[in-house]
Amino acid sequence: MRYSFAELEQVSTWLLEQAAGFSLICFEADLGTGKTTLIKSILKTLGSEDTISSPSFGLVNEYKTGDGKPVYHFDFYRINSPEEAIDIGWFEYLDSGGLCLVEWPEKLGNLLDKEPYLLVKIRIEDGLRQIQLEENGV
């Protein structure tokens, strides 16, 4: 799917439809490609009224959907090893039942090997974002 920022609301709705059944959605893209912006739009689509920001320094932010369900937004750009994710409670978050949205999943190494997730790859082509989805159903 190709989209512009003006189409984020529609893209977020489409992406959530594609992610049905997944509690873990990972976002892979170059720096500045729009991962956080897309995640903010997804949270708004889920009815969150929270102030949404990048968790770059805290690694994880917690939000609530419109019906009070937790959503965890991770940004692992600054971690140096998968153990840092374990130290903040990575597995506890996964087991919480909340939706987990992960930026920079490649920093997790083999921690994703046994987890079902939807991978959202974002690239920029001709001024538009291009999304490619891959399922890891384990």
Image (cartoon, helix red, strand yellow):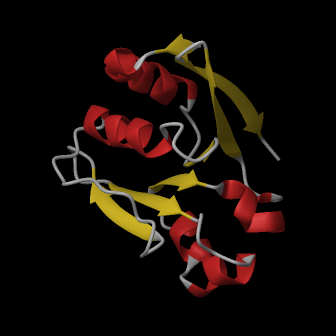
Which residue extends farthest front? 126
- How many numbered badges does the structure rendering display? 0
When the figure is inspected, residue 92 is found, relative to residue 54, above or below; the finding is: below
Nearest to the observer: residue 74 or residue 138: 74
Q: Is residue 97 visible?
A: no
Which residue is drawn at the image coordinates 58% and 47% (left, top)? Answer: 31
Relative image position of residue 108 (x, y in whole percent): 73, 66
Q: Is residue 108 visible?
A: yes
- 92 and 87: which is toward the camera: 87
Q: Where residue 20 appears, x then y in whole percent?
A: 53, 31
**Identity of the residue drawn at 64% across and 43% down:** 30
Residue 52 point in image, percent of width and height: 27, 53
Image quadrant where residue 19 sits: top right
Task: Determine whether 24 is above or below 55 in the image.
Answer: above
Which quarter of the figure is the N terminus placed in?
top right
Q: Nearer the viewer, residue 78 or 65?
A: 78
Q: Is residue 136 left or right of residue 78?
A: right
What's the residue at 42%, 36% (across, down)? 38
Residue extending farthest bottom: 87
Answer with the quarter of the image where residue 10 lies.
Answer: top left
- Left or right: 58, with 135 as reference point: left
Residue 118 x/y as whole percent: 66, 39
